[in-house]
């Protein structure tokens, strides 16, 4: 009987520990501009990075200011945050002739980027209890982001 109780207690502890491994991740996108279109927000692992997979949310016709998207039950680990203000609805980043994004965008650690991102450049660690991540949106205005 004592063994059965010990087993049940250990099993309950393992189940509780597994549940604690996931938490909510809130992404706060600041400096959003009301330009119509859709805001595509993603939270992706290294294997999912820059592919149409992972956690995703669409915000139709975002308004000026801060937009918050919350992903539920995200397992602890390393992720990249990205957002695209998709003005023409094609789901792809539009760029100028010289490769500068002409639609609004955000990425974890995005202010430091000077070219196409790698996962290691934009990686953020999500702890088991979840977290909040705040990133600014960048819109091309003739200035290099972060300068």
Image: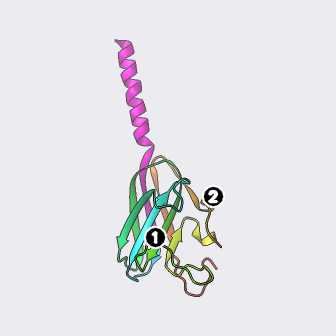
Q: Report the magenta residues as a range.
A: 1-28
Direction bottom: furthest residue = 142
Is residue 2 or residue 112 the one in the foreground?
112
- Indicate how the structure is coloured in the image: rainbow
Q: Quadrant of the N terminus?
A: top left
What residue is rendered at 47% in x and 69% in y? 83
| Nearer to me, 65 or 78 | 78
SS under mark 1 = strand
Is disc 2 surrounded by few (<14), some (14 to 19) or many (20+) residues within 10 Å? Answer: few
Contact (Cβ within 8 Å) of mark 1 with mark 2: no
Disc tally is: 2
Question: Would residue 17 appear left or right of 143 to someone viewing this image?
Answer: left
Label 1 sits on residue: 29
**What label sits on residue 120 in the rendered view?**
2
Residue 71 on the magenta segment: no
Residue reaching furthest to the top: 1
Closer to us: 146 or 84: 84
Q: Would you say the magenta stretch is mainly helix, strand or loop?
A: helix
Percent position (x, y) of residue 129? 45, 48
In which image quadrant can residue 3 be found? top left
Which callout, 1 or 2, points at the residue further toward the start of the chain? 1
Where does residue 34 sit, x and y in percent of width and height? 40, 82
């Amino acid at each position: 009987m004592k063994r059965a109780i010990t087993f049940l207690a250990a099993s309950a502890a393992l189940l509780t520990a597994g549940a604690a491994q996931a938490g909510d991740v809130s992404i706060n996108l600041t400096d959003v501009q009301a330009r119509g279109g859709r805001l595509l927000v993603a939270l992706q692992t290294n294997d999912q990075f820059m592919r149409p997979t992972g956690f995703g949310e669409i915000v139709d016709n975002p308004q000026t200011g801060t937009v918050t998207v919350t992903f539920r039950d995200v397992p602890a680990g390393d992720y990249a945050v990205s957002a695209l203000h998709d003005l023409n609805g094609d789901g792809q980043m539009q760029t100028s002739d010289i490769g500068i994004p002409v639609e609004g965008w955000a990425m974890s650690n995005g202010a430091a980027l000077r070219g196409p991102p790698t996962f290691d450049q934009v990686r953020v660690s999500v702890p088991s209890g979840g977290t909040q991540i705040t990133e600014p949106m960048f819109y091309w205005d003739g200035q290099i982001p972060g300068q």
